[in-house]
Amino acid sequence: MTSNTVSDSQKKHIVIVGNGMVGYKFCEKLLKKNDKGDFRITIFGEETRPAYDRVHLSAYFEDSSEEDLQLAPIEWYKENGIELHTGELITELDRDNQTVTSQKGRTVSYDKLILATGSSAFVPPIPGVEKKGVFVYRTIEDLDAITNYAKKASKAAVIGGGLLGLEAAKSAMDLGLETSVIEFAPRLMPRQLDEIGAQALKSALEDFNLEILLNKNTKQIAGNGTPEYLDFADGERLDADMVIISAGIRPRDELAKKADLEVGERGGIVVNDRMETNDPNIFAIGESALHRGMIYGLVAPGYEMADVVVENLTGGDEEFTEFDMSTKLKLVGVDVASFGDAFGETEENSKKVIIDNKAKGVYKRINISEDGKRLLGGMLVGDADDYNMLLQIAKNGFSLPPDPIDLIIGERDGETGAGQKVYDFPDDSIICSCESVTKGEICSLIEEEGMEDIDSIKGCTKAGTGCSGCVPMLDDLITQSMKARGKEVRKVICEHFDYTRQELYDLIKVKEIHTYDELLDEHGTGNGCEKCKPAVASLLASAFNEHVLKDRDTIQDTNDRFLANIQRGGTYSVIPRVPGGEITPDKLITIGQLAKKYGLYTKITGGQRINMMGARVDQLPNIWEELIEAGFESGHAYGKALRTVKSCVGSTWCRYGLHESVSFAIEIEERYRGLRAPHKLKGGVSGCVRECAEAQAKDFGIIATEEGWNLFVCGNGGTNPQHARLLATDLDEETLIKYLDRFLMFYIKTAEHLNRTSTWLNKMDGGLDYLKKVVVEDSLGIGEELEQEMQQLINVYACEWTEVVNDPELRKRFTHFVNSEDADPSLKFKDYREQKVPAPAGWEKDSK
Amino acid sequence: MQTTQNVNQWFKAAKVEDFPKNGGACVKYKDQQIAVFNFSRRGEWYACQNMCPHKKEMALARGMIGESENEPKVACPFHKKAFSLQSGENINGEEEAVTTYPVKVEDGYVYIGLS
């Protein structure tokens, strides 16, 4: 021990009761101020897990695992010298002796005590709430119980139409239940939205098949042991076999009450502006604290309170005053935001500007001062992209455009001005409201420290790590700040190549470079990484369409390296090409027999093909050998390449069909099969406007008209669904293929790596108009060149699995061990609805 | 950190040419799985446990190798968790470190040092 550290007995002991988000944040903030080691920290949590992200709880149902939700692993507490006790509820507080005691009988003394006990779900005294099958929505345990129960339920009722109620409803829907939300008030979210806004939200939610019942007072939850139906005061009845109650929160103030700390009449530990209770050694923060008669049920004010206490404990004098309750959320899939003076109540004669676009389900309202010079606040439903911008304009009192409606009219084709606006903000404007990071702090990192990527800025300031709503603004700031200094903004691939993807493509083509090593030796530095290797592999494939495993297997992502998609547990999936989704009975039988022979799980894919899953790496060449024998070829389901061209049944069978969509889909799919691109590519062909092939959700979509075909481009499903845009109308097949050649090749040559066509178009200067000019009008004069380049790729196409099957050297790589013929002994499967599925150890916690 | 000081036994794994250049392959030693990497661009060999600590998948041998600021690393094919091939530390996250092993090449064979 060195002389300038404080010995343990001299250290002030800070004890925190409650290891939730706010309790954790308090630790994090106190550690930052504890560089001299003045404090010793102990934290108690009632739950068995360390603090986790309750705000994104519904994500637990989707992809996140429990550990993704965790704010910090147990080791973090250890490494920082924090004594963490989970699964220990504090039941006694002795203020005279300054000790707390847990239900396990552990007593610790404190110098300062922080109550971050949070809240519990409020359960109204409705008859029937005690039934099995009635849940609250608060902890991971609640979610696990709901998930389990939902397996045998079919219809869920959620009592409470506030933020948490709608989150709970989303979870119930994600579990496949028909879901109704029951709200006592005449509209949803009355604190945040006006009547038209609430109506817009209701319509949007109903479009997601969520039933919303307003003005409903639940009288009882009826059923024999478990819920069967709900009775309402108005005499109506709703069938439901599962009920989730989300009718508000109750501060956990029982410990405080027992110790005679002052609590509010309707709950909450009374604190002053310094967050002190009536005992100067005890503070309360978060949802359990009652500040000026108000309980704050959001996490951001809780963090602010934590900050105030840390300052006050470390010699500062901070006060928690009013808190800006501006917020932006995604509810069920609908963006909702409210900011500043949302109802225009703070100033007389304020004016409102409203866009109520019922066709698009978008409602935007802003309130401006009488003189039209300042933005007071507003609300957004259905499209909240402008939220951060508007919030900053309102907070900082920026001057408004001559017609304030321009603030909410949104981005139109070819116009992108938003980025410049952020850069014009004054330095003290808050960019990240979760972590209170200003524009000035971010810009000084960019300009003085030379940080030019979002990850380093996140790491340094924590900006963008909370709700991540400000990430687009961070990106804009980096771009604009670099531009302002005359510095070229180039999205280079990684530290090994100081080139953009487009520049590398040109180098590869012009210098005819055919291997990664050659490119790296001549135009890069170092020895490569997992970013540039697959990017270059994709470029080489797009440039020459040579076999992806010959001399280049180790630069491929694992799916391309084994020409199959890796799955949980380490097995692979096998998807042969089924062009246009048309398949003969004989081929179906082959697939069935193969799946039986190798014990594979089978499922129909979204792209009208059949997926055989659970194949070991050593089985892949054998399975493919048999498939190829039966006339199949690779489906490239593992590649950033053309996947499928989906089709409807077409005019051969369909009584509405205008043209033969199946034949055209097969022609297109076979034309572009194996085409590698910056990201995967999907197409669709529909025989009439009924659009059964869902072509407008594809990278390219073709829809029959009376006169010919309409061509749509740049649509996709996935995380951010986007409808395809109409590129050209009433085309004959030859012209359509010409445009498609140009479009695809232009995308391949100019997009960033891993950008889908939709993202590529969104970033394109000039937008759709520009794309039309290049593809249809050939404004750059490169039309013919693009067509020729495409034709070269088509000419050299060969099924890459056929080549592997016939090449003993390539086949040799398909083994688990290099020194044994054994299969991976760690593979484990279980039976599941008459098929086998993986049962890998490491995924147990979050498997559904 | 791998060191040859504590090696009790050199396990003869396979021939040099059985390992892909600038890539990895999995070696079976009793009931253990060890990922061995032939980083031929650097003229170096590395070995570590085949199991990625993140989801406990036996997958690191199938990962892509590379370097960040000259530190050699392997990225797991499942979620791109990257581990230093020298220290075993998780470079881009907070996963547990992986165990690394010394490797030597003699007479055309690759040996893994076991302690």
Image (cartoon, rainbow, N blue to C red):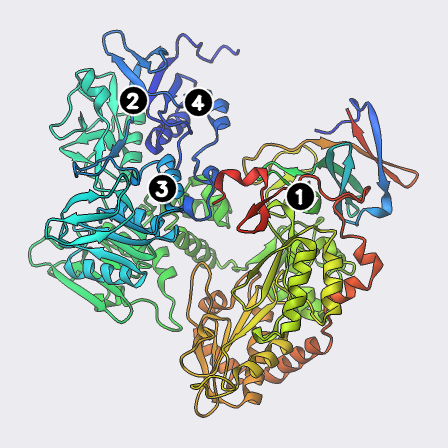
Res. A747 image quadrant: bottom right
Question: Residue A9, position in %: x, y?
Answer: 41, 7
Q: CA distance from mark 1 to mark 3?
A: 33 Å
Q: Residues within 10 Å of mark 2 (few under 14, many from 20)?
A: many
Q: What chain is tagged by disc 4?
A: A
* Numbered tag placed on residue A539 in the rendering: none
The residue tagged 1 is: B59
Residue A403 placed where, x, y %?
21, 69
Q: Which residue is mark 3?
A: A146
For the residue carrying disc 4, how many other residues have a C-alpha within 10 Å: few (<14), some (14-19), or many (20+)? few
Q: Is residue A789 above or below residue A472?
A: below
Q: Is residue B107 above or below residue A477?
A: above
Q: Is residue A522 above or below residue A272?
A: below
Left or right: where does residue A724 sit relative to residue A256? right
What is the distance, in whole Å, between disc 2 and disc 1 at their CAs?
45 Å
Splitting the image into 4 quarters, where does residue A283 fall?
Answer: top left
Residue A35 is tagged as 4
- What type is the residue that disc 1 sits on? Ala
Q: Nearer the viewer, mark 3 or mark 2?
A: 3
- Give the CA distance from mark 2 to mark 4: 20 Å
